[in-house]
Amino acid sequence: MKNRIFCQILALGLLCGLRAVCGQESTPALIAAKKTSPAEFLDALGKTAKARWRLYFRPPPPTPPVDRAKAALILGSLVAESHLIWQATDSQQFRNNNQDLVTYCRMIGVGDGIMPRLMAQGKMAEMEQWKELRTEISLTQDEMSRLLHEMQDDDLSHLIDTGLWLRVLEVCNSIAAEAPTEIAPDLRLTTQSATNELREHLSAVSANLSDCKYLQQLRNILDALPKDPKANESIQTMMQSLLDKEK
């Protein structure tokens, strides 16, 4: 019951923009706001499902593709991976993922601006400064958005956010598929919250990219989610297609 209340507050915050604090002295409080951060979302997910985060790590991505829209989606998923790895406090895995972030940031043109922050994060992970690192991961995402806005490339910023929440939703679906029946209602709430975030960021992408096959595919998947249970599997398939090497 306590977990269900926790997730309901999270979902309500995402949908209505209300603020609520959940928990007592023995339970870490979560502030559910209109813009719940990926870190807060994964906190809630881990609390509900007692997730074994290392099970959901994924292999390194391929060499950045020529398609900048695809690269931005992958970059967003790498930011999500940073949040996921933080939950597991895995220093080596974090630094490995950080190197992939550096490569993809260079590809989309924000490497020089973001490099000092990413290098500092790698050092924090090495020294296991997890509290400070949590804030830095979120600031990295904000910095990418700022740099892309200055480059008048807001679409790439929205695509990074889309890729981030696509990866979060994939993790949520994977955890839900293996979770005990008694927490299934709670996980449905968190899955719906992640889906809502993904929809919002996807809708912010301009019509200039309406022909992007990955965005068309993602829209079709999201449209099918309410009525087609198997559509959840399509999230994993799409994530994998992004990571497949170009032929």
Image: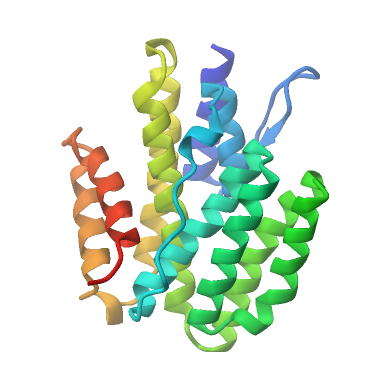
Task: Return the x and y of residue 180 as percentages of the image width and height.
Answer: 41, 13
* Residue located 21% across and 69% down the image: 213
* Residue located 59% across and 71% down the image: 102
173, above or below 79, in the image:
above
156, above or below 133, in the image:
below
Of 62 and 78, the residue lying toward us: 62
205, above or below 185, in the image:
below
Left or right? Give the position of 178 relative to 20.
Answer: left
> Quick check: can you spot residue 18?
no
133, above or below 114, in the image:
above
Task: Return the x and y of residue 87 as percentages of the image width and height.
Answer: 63, 38
Location of the N terminus (image quadrant): top right
Location of the C terminus (image quadrant): bottom left
> Quick check: can you spot residue 71?
yes
Which quarter of the figure has residue 112?
bottom right
Task: Return the x and y of residue 167 as percentages of the image width and height.
Answer: 43, 50
* Residue located 24% across and 57% down the image: 219
